[in-house]
Image (tube, rainbow, N blue to C red):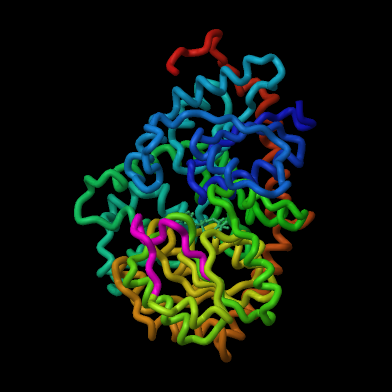
Amino acid sequence: MGISGLHAVIVPFPAQRTINPLINLAQLLSSRGVVITFVNMDWSHKCMSKAAHNDDEPTFKFLNIPDGLPPDHGRLANLAESVIAMENLGPVLEHHLLSSSSDGKTPPVTCIITENFMSCTHQVAKKLGVPRVIFWTLCATSSIAQCNANLLLSHGHIPVKVEDSKRAEKVITCLPGNLPPLLPSDLFSFYRATDTSGVLFQWALRESQFQSKADYVLVNTFDELEPPETVSALSCNGCPALAVGPVFLPNFLEGRDLNGRGSLLEQDESCLKWLDAQDPASVIYVSFGSIAVKSNEQLEELAIGLEKSQHPFLWVLRMDIAGGMPATLPEGFEERTKDRGLIVKWAPQVKVLSHPSVGGFISHCGWNSCLESMSMGIPILGWPYSADQFLDCRFCKDVWKIGIDLEGVDVDENLVIKREEIERGVRRLMEGKEAQELRKRGMELKGAAFKAVGQGGSSFTNLNRFIHDMTQLSKSASVKRAYPQSIPSIC
Ligand code: UDX
């Protein structure tokens, strides 16, 4: 039994975007004496085991369960089928949790901590008679928009017509949390549709109903970005809603690379040596996260834009970046840029962003990438692709002022950005007065992130409060454990 008396079952959506923050949260709780069971799908566990090459073994155990999809299923490459499989995971999850705790050694589960898109945990938590904690892996603003999807629907803001973005009367002001006014193009790209019958549209709407039924809410953000009054708008029936991020940062500062441990692809560490040989703050890091794809036409424009900018670059070109096609780069590009460019398939991103040679990040603005970049003080050239990335990109530019973007990316997902615009963006990010201002702001945000997670900081204190509250709840008579006598035989 851990010293806190708590046993948290942690359930990410099986994707890099949620495994990384949840494995970091798990480690933070484990370091504070909470017993952790981290739930992986069999396939994600296999990927993690194959990719892991560092010694950062977490201090908790994993529980691997089947996701019900055939072994050769493309998983996230077929998101629509994957999300439905996750919606139906409840009985399997419950069965495996009960089996794993029947060994007489595992302490009883005292809470389930789940990523925001895992509604299947709602029923499981009810059956076990424990609180269900939602950990929002998006920024609080996107989270508020997502969990109020039905309100947005009733106000006619979704389905989203992105061409309305420039019309003042379409600005969204009905959401709680004292948010800056949102544009239609800030909303989840799943809601960009001509009709409401699409699988992802309907799924995101269904999930929103369970997002407003949590017993406790944590958010991977920090005070300087989004104040407590914003985060509080995620409260469900008056439960606490607390900012505890960036959750990777305390582990990183203690020399623990949990993103490396949670990585589904092998991180190529050789790029760190290459960075050692570059000038301070000279390198642009280019990465579009784990899911975004680009056409070969677009990759060619990007390559030439980088080349023309003359700046050194480290470019993550995932095997599947061209959506199943082999990625092709312009003829002679690698030879012409070999003295100042390096291409890898997958990088140790946090180590890269914290390297003194890196000066800017061309990013799809996934929320983890944004937090990691801000925490290291690195300005962002935003190039969003889907989901919440449009809001993150615009807020990096207009609200948090650590970023710029490329012309037109917010309204047209299929736009091919031309080489001249990319070169211009890189120069803005890396040269002159604008770049200096961005770096200054980067340093301010880095300071604020470090402060938030440091001893006595807001996120540090909130995490301790969470443990305290969970301990009280688990002791209180109101938490009735309703463990069934026998294990349901559904597997
Ligand atoms: C997805 C969604 O598309 C996005 O909208 C949401 O905000 C987060 O999840 P994803 O592509 O997974 O985006 O991006 P991101 O959130 O940035 O997470 C990627 C993670 O992979 C980061 O933690 C990053 O450090 C890691 N990474 C990325 C690597 O370890 N190596 C790389 O080369 C690139």
Task: Indicate yes or no whether the magenta region holds residue 231.
Answer: no
- Please state which of residues 279 and 97 is positioned toward the viewer in this rendering: 279
> Residue 46, percent across and down?
54, 38
- Please state which of residues 333 and 145 is positioned toward the viewer in this rendering: 333
Q: Residue furthest left?
A: 195
> Residue 375, percent across and down?
65, 65
- Please state which of residues 423 and 469 is positioned toward the viewer in this rendering: 423
Q: Which residue shows up at 70% across the image and 31% down it? A: 35
| Quarter of the image where the N terminus is located | top right
Q: Which residue shows up at 61% across the image and 67% down it? A: 374
Visible residue check, residue 400: no
Q: Which residue shows up at 32% across the image and 72% down it? A: 297
> Residue 434, percent across and down?
55, 87
Tally of marks: 0
Vertical arrangement, residue 489 with respect to residue 55, above or below = above
Vertical arrangement, residue 401 with respect to residue 430, above or below = above
Q: Residue furthest top?
A: 485
Q: Which residue shows up at 59% across the image and 47% down it? A: 51
Our reading of the magenta stretch's main secondary structure is: loop
| Quarter of the image where the C terminus is located | top left
Vertical arrangement, residue 144 with respect to residue 12, above or below = below
- Please state which of residues 386 and 298 is positioned toward the viewer in this rendering: 298
**In screen coordinates, is 87 left or right of 455?**
left
Q: Which residues are magenta?
A: 315-329
Visible residue check, residue 63: yes
**In screen coordinates, is 298 left or right of 57?**
left
Task: Indicate yes or no whether the magenta region holds residue 321.
Answer: yes
**Which corner quadrant of the image does residue 300 belong to?**
bottom left
Vertical arrangement, residue 127 with respect to residue 444, above or below = above
> Residue 386, percent across and down?
38, 59
**In screen coordinates, is 305 left or right of 274?**
left
